[in-house]
Image (cartoon, rainbow, N blue to C red):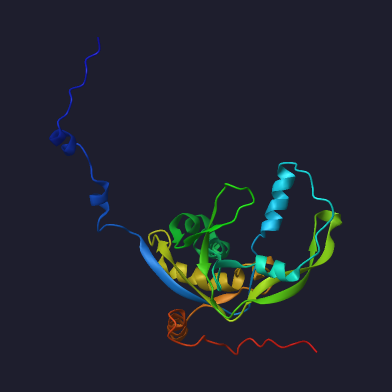
Amino acid sequence: MAKQKPILSDAEKADNVVSLRALLEGKSTFKRFDVWVVGDTPLITHSWSEKAKLEMLRKQVKAVKAAGRQARDPEEDFQNSLYEIKNGVYAFPTTAAKLALMSAAHVDKGISKTAILSNVWMDCSMYRVRPALAGAVCDMPLTRIYGAKPEMREDMVRVGAGMNKTSTLAYRAQFFPWAARLTGRFNPTQVPPESLAFLFDEAGRACGLCDWRNEKRGVFGSFHMANEEEEEAWTKFSKGEGPMPRYETLMLEAAE
């Protein structure tokens, strides 16, 4: 018969346990970043509406399609395009900021997309949104938008696939002026601080955030890192201690 291993005492067990926490205490290589990004062009958000998600679910489960089409409601489309985290407070997906950094990264610039993917972590708050399937959960990482109240914008868009695209009107939310505070952690041994700063600056011009951004052949959602004066102004505004900063660099003029 196989011999049984002797049972260790509590003291002997303790002697054989390595405290991983103790090994890391005071030795973590991770650093934190805290940066305000300020919008240079309006930010367009476009959340999935409950109606659109229900329609996708019906197709997937091959449910009977409701007879007739509901009348278009632009105001409903506008409200559905918003990521509202509480009454009158709006946000955009935190993943958009991470993707903007990855889009700006390239090995030829000295920092690869994989390095950003694996070594930069964005802080976020999780908000539960209503799913299409009752009983399921959908938690989204969202970052708050600071600035003006959203306005309804109207755009001509083409929807559909291939040769079957048709023209229609889209009604979405637009914010301007706007700013966001992005915080998180990064590994400076893989992503040097100066490289991360460069990517935040580059991402604002080369990619942008949300709909019709530069990366998607648009000009919206572009941003820059706040300078010291802007950071102070937006911090005060976010705490309710100062007015909303305004900029004259972008003139919004009505077409005649």
Please give the name of the residue rendered at 59% of the width and 73% of the height, measured from the top-left corner.
Answer: 205
Please give the name of the residue rendered at 75% of the width and 74% of the height, measured from the top-left corner.
Answer: 154
In this rendering, the answer to whether 85 lies above or below 132 is below
> Quadrant location of residue 27?
bottom left
Please give the name of the residue rendered at 41% of the width and 61% of the height, measured from the top-left corner.
Answer: 186
Residue 217 visible to an observer of this rendering: no
Which quarter shows the C terminus? bottom right
Q: Position of residue 76 (x, y in %)?
A: 71, 67
In front: 102, or 59? Answer: 59
Q: Position of residue 133 (x, y in %)?
A: 63, 48
Residue extending furthest toward the top:
1
In this rendering, the answer to whether 54 lies above or below 4 is below
Callout count: 0
Please give the name of the residue rendered at 40% of the width and 62% of the height, measured from the top-left corner.
Answer: 185
Q: Along the horizontal axis of the image, is 146 left or right of 75?
A: left
Residue 133 visible to an observer of this rendering: yes
In front: 68, or 248? Answer: 68
Q: Position of residue 108 (x, y in %)?
A: 55, 62
In front: 79, or 163? Answer: 79
In this rendering, the answer to whether 89 lies above or below 110 is below
Q: Along the horizontal axis of the image, is 206 left or right of 37?
A: right
Which quarter shows the N terminus? top left
